[in-house]
Amino acid sequence: MAARTGSGVLGLPPGPRGRLRGTTLLVWGGTAGLILWSWHGTRFDPIALLGAGGRAEILAYARNLFPPDLASAFLAKVLYWSLETFAMSFMGTLLSVAIALLLVFPATRTLAFSGVLFERDEAGRPIRILRIGLFLGARVVLNILRTVPHIVWALIFVFAVGLGPFPGVLALGLHTGGVLGKLFAEAAEDIETQPLEALQATGASRLQILVYGILPRVAPQLLAYSLYRWEVNIREAIILGYVGAGGLGQQIQIAISLFLENKLLTLILAIYAMVTLVDYLSAFLRRRLL
Amino acid sequence: MDPSPSAATFPRPDRTRALFPGLLSLCWLIAFVGSWHLAQVEPGLLFQAESRRNMAKFIAGMFPPELSGDFFRLLVGPALETIQISVMGTVLAIAIGLPLGLLGTASLTITGVLNEFELAGAPARRAARIVPYACARGLPSTFRCIPEFVWAFMFVRAVGLGPFPGVLAIGVAYGGMLGKVYSEILENQGMRGSEALQATGATRWKVLCYGLIPQALPQLVSYTLYRWECAVRASAILGFVGAGGLGQQIELSMRMFNFHEVVTLVLLLFLLVATVDFLSGTLRKAIA
């Protein structure tokens, strides 16, 4: 398969033919090497998995899942846990949007120190250095928020404030805040500058330029990004349950550890429903609002 | 569903449209208040004496980061394993996603120019095509709606600890995503080239190999590379449930309160992710 798709890359209208051929060879050779190395390193073994023994084990496990536990007492609890997970993702996403909006002003290059808004700037050197420092600081904060994975943030906050969904909200908020802040800043830097210049010519301050010039312009994009991150966050919220942030994830962990397979299937169905619901809501809102 | 042309040109003021902002705000408010309670949001908790003490303990524990040679030697294996899991996971995801994506491409199997003549007046044949199509659409959604973390958990139970369940988890979850996106990409391709190929007498398989796939290849490869970037992040997390890689180390250090090791691990993870992002970004630019 690799060879055929490889010739496909070669067949595309490219630059200098010789160079492309060399690079293509390198790319596909490298890919093949990487795959072989990974195959070996991960002890990838489809035969053990799909051979008679593995197949029987997996089928046995799958059979144990059925029927799902549909006792009404359990279903009520599942509903509560689902709502808890939903709440975690919702509050986490809101927190992340708040963080991103707070940091987007200093983290946007064109608002912080360069571009048309600063062409005729008469501020002295110290002020300019301060601005660049503020910009760099905001970017570093965003990078840190983004680099630390959700689950590590969750562990940190579980350590700090104890178990429960609240540390999950904080973890989702901080990590996603870093992601959204970067995306927001990039969106704000990408817009055309003439309207901003016009605003500035009327005497608008930079904050006013942000509020009346940039935000209305990028609002659809920010909304789309935020809704998309909400879809990611409902999945992450489930994961965070594993480290003690409550909701469906925690119950999944309990069900798997205690071999409660019938309950596990109910929980998986609930996850499926929650994720589908949020995906649908997000798509619906995007369609209606954008 | 489709509005008639006159309705499209002169939109009538629509009652539901006028109601929408109000309804939306109301729903939002309910969701906000409800979520605030359910998620037990208590900002005050962050500033309590005990939380502050724990926070201080954590920050103080971070310094100085563990930078000894021994520790790094310990990490080389898991770090490489994280990369390996992501690569094999993506390969498996392609192996699962490509067939599903092809079967789930309506323009290839049931609708559009390629099937016009063949399926006209042949309802039985059409029905026979719709069944695999519907399966190929439904299966990926099951695969991807269950987070890879939960898959990993189950595969660890099924095949034991180690990187292999991590590969399977990423392969299944991302196979679903790739399947869905592949069929979306393929359906969005212009069909003229494929139609011309079909007119020369090419079989469907040939139309696919010489028309549709080469046409869509840059997008397909680009999205697959993007998924690989995501897979690196995911494979680091999967270690938490015992699926190998850096995650296992992060969990260990976190549970032992060795925060100075956590700092190093997170930095290392950042480096790994940045390297893969760079590699994948370069490739994507070269393809585009």
Image: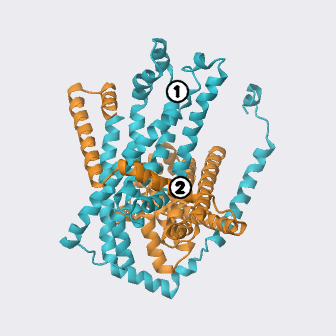
Instruction: From the image, tell me which residue sits under label 1.
Output: B108
Name chain B's colour. Answer: cyan
For the point 45% across and 11% down, the residue is B200
Q: Is residue B278 visible?
A: yes
Instruction: From the image, tell me which residue sits under label 2.
Output: A62
Of all residues shown, which one is farthest toward the left?
A: B69
Residue A273 locus on image (x, y percent): 63, 55
Q: Nearer the viewer, mark 1 or mark 2?
A: 2
Disc 1 marks a residue whose amino acid type is Leu
For the point 51% across and 33% down, the residue is B103
**Circle 1 SS class:** helix
For the point 38% across and 53% down, the residue is B167
Which quadrant would residue B272 be assigned to in this image? bottom left
Q: Looking at the colours in the rendered structure, which chain would you say is drawn in orange?
A: A
For the point 76% across and 34% down, the residue is B11
Label 1 – label 2 distance at C-alpha:
33 Å
Q: What is the quadrant of the N terminus of chain A in the image? A: top left
| Residue A164 drawn above or below residue A51 | below
| Residue B71 drawn above or below residue A89 | below
Q: Chain ID for label 1?
A: B
Q: Nearer the viewer, residue B122 or B43?
A: B122
Disc 2 marks a residue whose amino acid type is Ala
Residue B206 locus on image (x, y percent): 42, 21
